[in-house]
């Protein structure tokens, strides 16, 4: 459990800092790292997804605290064609972070098993 | 592994490149550098900034509503800071405006904008801007201002790029703004010229003449307006002997080829977005009252230019103070200077003068000499200019524009047709604007306007000495011969040979009545010796001008409050003329039930187009119905290829004139005499004005009952007439409205269209006696929809209220003011 929490915290921290400087795909890279580093897919996937979700979500919370994102969310909802539904862009933003982390972890995990399976067959 | 790779690939693809209508999700929604940056951009705070290129420190103060005051120690710095502030709040709008004029919209929005880009490159705003720029000497003050302004814009572009804080629409469309150049500013100026005075009216007239025949066309779409008018310059007129006045002669036939060419261009223009061709919807009012007729004993001035209302607005409100400029008013983002406003001694506003500045020429070609045309007896080669149009998501489009001596070839379908447009003549309008901004009296104001070419504007003037004036400044092209309201032969004899000399253009200074006005009406009487355009589709029908003159003519002195009331006035002059005649027609019959109820409502009406007025709805629907019943049979019989509704202004003027004389039009077929009294009974169905009015009224009430229910009292104007202020990027969710609103196309409070998206884009009232300056525009200073300055002024504007135009000192001590300190 401690390793899971550590992976989540480190992954989230790295992804958040990277996203903050404009590297928006950082959750995907972090997810790959988690997928490769963590042996169990059932754990790696949610951890990767959570790291991506938190990285983008925390920055959104920071925006809210610093400037207030309500009017921006409403405007984005309108631009997206959902009227002034503020929830839509917020959900979409967090979902993008989540999906980047999740698919990264999935790819990392699948890659790890791909490397591991031939190794087993030759031993 | 395969499933993971596919899922990752799909997510990464959508994140990097987008999918379908979705933008690239990663960069677009990144919380720190994507679209969410509009939250930071929307915050307003005190700031200290360093701007490259400044000479000395500059102070920028924002009032609580966003009105901006720039105080600079050099003129150079005031233009640089203006560029920075414009870009800070309107960068995307500025980029759209330059892209539109330069034919570069497809580069960011794809092939949907290709027609627009092709047309703009054909027309030549970019070519003209380049010529204007190249004509400016290195030490020219306009050149220096343009360079400083561009530097300010580029300072902002560099800032957003380095901070990863691109405005939201750039992020969502996935492109970066290119550096701003002085030529971009000149193109934006060209956009406005095009919006206000490029027209296809001669082509429309050709299509009408071809289908209706020359007699009907001349009768329904005459050169001089047939209905009562209120010209502000009533003469006497002197004729300048060196320019030959144009006299209407025998009708010029329109060939099949010319009609084909006209139809081609007309259809092309009809598919382009609003604003590419001047329309009557874009009308305006202005007037001034002399100190002697004012309650404050100082001159009064009011101006409200009517344009397409958008968010962000076309205007940015600004006050500048520098050694050479002390001006306050509104300007256009992308350009330096104040277009409408006041300085310490004078105030000015403008309306479109509406005279003809677009002429079409049918080039004479010979199949034996391809690529050549005949002009003044000689065969000449067309010049060509080649353009590449980058298209987002598609291959680059190549375009070759042919140019004759008259101007760009606009179509080669049917007959090669080129267009002579005054907007294509390089002009130094910014020099004129600077002159106006610095003028201290009428003489300086008038001298500055001598250099104004296009678009022709009615510049109203008032000063701190109680003087008033109006000058319809600009080019009034004169042709050697022919009928310029139709496409003319391009062989040389019909060319534009000059313009009316400045001394003889419409103008007036301190008129004896003590007031002066313009509302896009023909400025002069039928005695004026020069051709300046036909009544239809050049000048306004004149109802707003008539109403404004009526209101200003009333006895007693006038106040600033009266000026404000008149800007919000909803009295329909045409309704006041026609309704009594209609009621008379109804009284003679056996009107009953619903029709009688509707007639009773009209009888008690004050002719004001108010939201809760059912009579207003009945009147408006009746007049549209009457025009339709009078002319639709002709349109059908003659197979007219122009929408009848496009010509409603002119047809309405004709019907109004007949109705005032107790007549109406007769109906086809086999009848070429459209006035009922002249109808030969054997060939035409006779219909008296009374019967025609009753028939249209009956249709009106039936139509309204179907649309709004059986009770006429519930047919209120607000149910059918709404106003919407549209988002510039066509995002419906960011529109303001639609909401029920007052007025119509004929009222001083202009609100044409159902729904209406045109109207007073800026209202200003000046009282030099009281020293008060007030203004408002329907929008906000910021294009950022998350900003409190996106649409914060709309409600005030809607209620007919104004905001005081403060001095920089007053602004800095006003509640909620914020300050930027700009350092070199």
Image (cartoon, coloured by chain):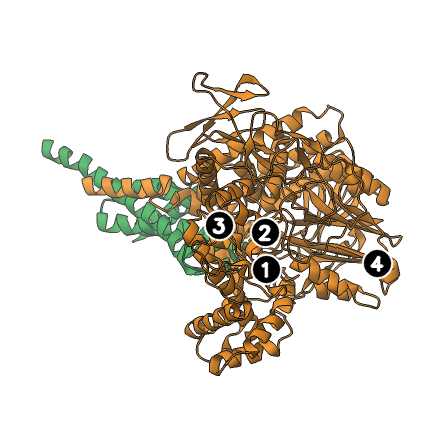
| Residue of label 3 | B36
Q: Nearer the viewer, residue B297 or B599?
A: B599
Pointer 3 chain: B
Q: Chain of mark 1?
A: B
User: Up-down: is B706 above or below B552?
Assistant: below
- Dot 4 surroundings within 10 Å: few (below 14), some, or many (20 or more)? few
Using the image as rendered, state which of residue B519 and residue B324 is in the foreground: B519
Q: Which residue is mark 4?
A: B513
Which mark lies nearer to you, 1 or 4? 4
Quarter of the rendering occupied by the N terminus of chain B: top left
The residue identified by callout 1 is B745
Which of disc 3 and disc 1 is earlier in sequence?
Answer: 3
Q: Which residue is mark 2?
A: B280
Instruction: Chain A: give its colour.
Output: green
Q: Are marks 2 and 3 in contact (CB under 8 Å)?
A: no
Crowdedness near tag 1: few (<14), some (14–19) or many (≥20) residues, C-alpha within 10 Å: many
- Across and down, in percent, residue B472 comes to 73, 45
Are tags 3 and 4 found on a single chain? yes
Which of the marked residues, 3 or 4, is nearer the chain's N terminus? 3
């Amino acid at each position: 459990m401690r390793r899971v929490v550590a992976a989540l915290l480190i992954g989230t921290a790295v992804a958040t800092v990277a996203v903050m400087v404009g590297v928006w795909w950082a959750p995907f890279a972090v997810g790959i790292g988690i997928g490769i580093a963590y042996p169990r897919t059932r754990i790696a996937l949610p951890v990767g997804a959570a790291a991506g979700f938190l990285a983008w979500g925390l920055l959104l919370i920071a925006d809210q605290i610093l400037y207030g994102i309500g009017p921006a969310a409403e405007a984005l909802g309108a631009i997206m064609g959902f009227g002034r539904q503020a929830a839509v862009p917020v959900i979409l933003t967090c979902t993008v972070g989540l999906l980047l982390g999740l698919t990264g972890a999935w790819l990392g995990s699948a890659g790890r098993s791909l490397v591991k399976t031939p190794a087993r067959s030759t031993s | 592994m395969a499933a993971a790779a596919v899922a990752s690939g799909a997510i990464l693809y959508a994140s990097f490149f987008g999918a379908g209508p979705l933008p690239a999700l990663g960069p677009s929604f990144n919380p720190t550098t994507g679209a969410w940056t509009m939250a930071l951009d929307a915050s307003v705070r005190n700031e200290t900034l360093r701007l490259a290129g400044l000479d000395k420190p500059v102070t920028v103060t924002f009032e609580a509503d966003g009105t901006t005051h720039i105080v600079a120690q050099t003129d150079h710095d005031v233009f640089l800071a203006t560029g920075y502030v414009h870009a800070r709040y309107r960068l995307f709008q500025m980029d759209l405006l330059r892209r539109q004029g330069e034919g570069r919209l497809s580069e960011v929005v794809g092939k949907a904008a290709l027609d627009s880009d092709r047309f703009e490159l054909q027309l030549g705003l970019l070519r003209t801007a380049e010529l204007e720029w190249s004509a400016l000497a290195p030490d020219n003050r306009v050149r220096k201002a343009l360079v400083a302004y561009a530097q300010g814009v580029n300072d902002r572009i560099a800032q957003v790029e380095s901070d990863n804080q691109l405005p939201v629409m750039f992020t969502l469309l996935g492109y970066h703004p290119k550096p701003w150049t002085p030529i971009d500013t000149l193109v934006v100026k060209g956009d406005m010229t095009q919006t206000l005075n490029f027209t296809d009216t001669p082509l429309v007239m050709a299509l009408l003449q071809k289908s209706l025949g020359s007699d009907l066309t001349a009768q329904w779409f005459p050169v001089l307006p047939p209905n009562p008018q209120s010209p502000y310059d009533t003469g006497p007129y002197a004729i300048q002997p060196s320019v030959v006045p144009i006299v209407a002669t025998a009708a010029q036939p329109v060939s099949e080829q010319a009609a084909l060419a006209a139809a081609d261009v007309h259809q092309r223009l009809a598919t382009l977005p609003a604003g590419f061709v001047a329309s009557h919807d874009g009308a305006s009012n202005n007037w001034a009252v002399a100190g002697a007729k004012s309650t404050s004993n100082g001159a009064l001035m009011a101006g409200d230019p009517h344009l397409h209302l958008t968010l962000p607005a076309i205007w940015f409100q600004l006050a500048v103070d520098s050694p050479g400029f002390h001006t306050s008013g509104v300007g256009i983002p992308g350009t330096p200077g104040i277009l409408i406003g006041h300085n310490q001694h004078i105030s000015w506003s403008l309306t479109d003068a509406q005279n003809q500045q677009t002429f079409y020429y049918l080039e004479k070609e010979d199949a034996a000499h391809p690529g050549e045309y005949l002009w003044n007896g000689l065969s000449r080669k067309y010049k060509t200019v080649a353009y590449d149009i980058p298209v987002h998501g598609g291959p680059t489009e190549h375009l070759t524009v042919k140019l004759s001596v008259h101007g760009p070839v606009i179509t080669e379908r049917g007959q090669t047709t080129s267009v002579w447009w005054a907007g294509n003549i390089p002009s130094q309008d910014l020099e004129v604007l600077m002159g106006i901004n610095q003028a201290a009296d009428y003489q300086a104001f008038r001298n500055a306007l001598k250099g104004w070419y296009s678009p022709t504007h009615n510049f109203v003037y008032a000063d701190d000495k109680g003087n008033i004036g109006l000058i319809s400044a600009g080019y009034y092209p004169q042709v050697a011969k022919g009928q310029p309201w139709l496409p003319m032969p391009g062989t040389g004899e019909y060319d534009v040979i000059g313009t009316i000399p400045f001394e003889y253009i419409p103008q007036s200074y301190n008129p004896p009545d003590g007031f002066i006005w313009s509302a896009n009406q023909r400025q002069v009487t039928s005695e004026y010796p020069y051709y300046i355009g036909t009544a239809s589709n050049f000048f306004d029908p004149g109802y707003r001008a008539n109403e404004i003159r009526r209101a200003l003519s009333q006895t007693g002195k006038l106040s600033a409050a009266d000026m404000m009331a008149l800007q919000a006035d909803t009295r329909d002059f045409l309704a006041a003329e026609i309704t009594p005649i209609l009621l008379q027609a109804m009284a003679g019959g056996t009107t009953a039930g619903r029709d009688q109820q509707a007639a009773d409502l009209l009888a008690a009406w004050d002719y004001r187009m108010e939201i809760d007025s059912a009579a207003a709805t009945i009147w408006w629907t009746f007049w549209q119905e009457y025009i339709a019943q009078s002319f639709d049979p002709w349109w059908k019989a003659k197979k007219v290829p122009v929408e009848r509704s496009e010509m409603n202004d002119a047809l309405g003027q004709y019907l109004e004139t007949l109705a005032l004389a107790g007549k109406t039009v007769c109906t086809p077929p086999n009848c070429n005499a459209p006035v009922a009294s002249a109808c030969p009974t054997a060939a035409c169905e006779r219909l008296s004005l009374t019967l025609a009015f009753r028939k249209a009224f009956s249709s009106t009430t039936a139509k309204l009952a179907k649309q709004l229910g059986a009770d006429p009292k519930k047919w209120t104007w607000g149910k059918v007439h709404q106003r919407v202020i549209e988002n510039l990027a066509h995002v419906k969710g960011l529109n303001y409205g639609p909401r029920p609103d007052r007025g119509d196309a004929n009222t001083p409070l202009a609100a044409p269209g159902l729904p209406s998206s045109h109207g007073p884009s800026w209202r200003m009232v000046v009282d030099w006696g009281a020293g008060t300056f007030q203004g408002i525009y329907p929008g906000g200073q910021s294009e950022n929809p998350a900003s409190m300055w996106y649409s914060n002024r709309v409600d005030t504007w809607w209620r007919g209220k104004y905001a005081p135009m403060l001095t920089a000192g007053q602004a800095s001590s006003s509640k909620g003011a914020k300050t930027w300190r700009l350092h070199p």
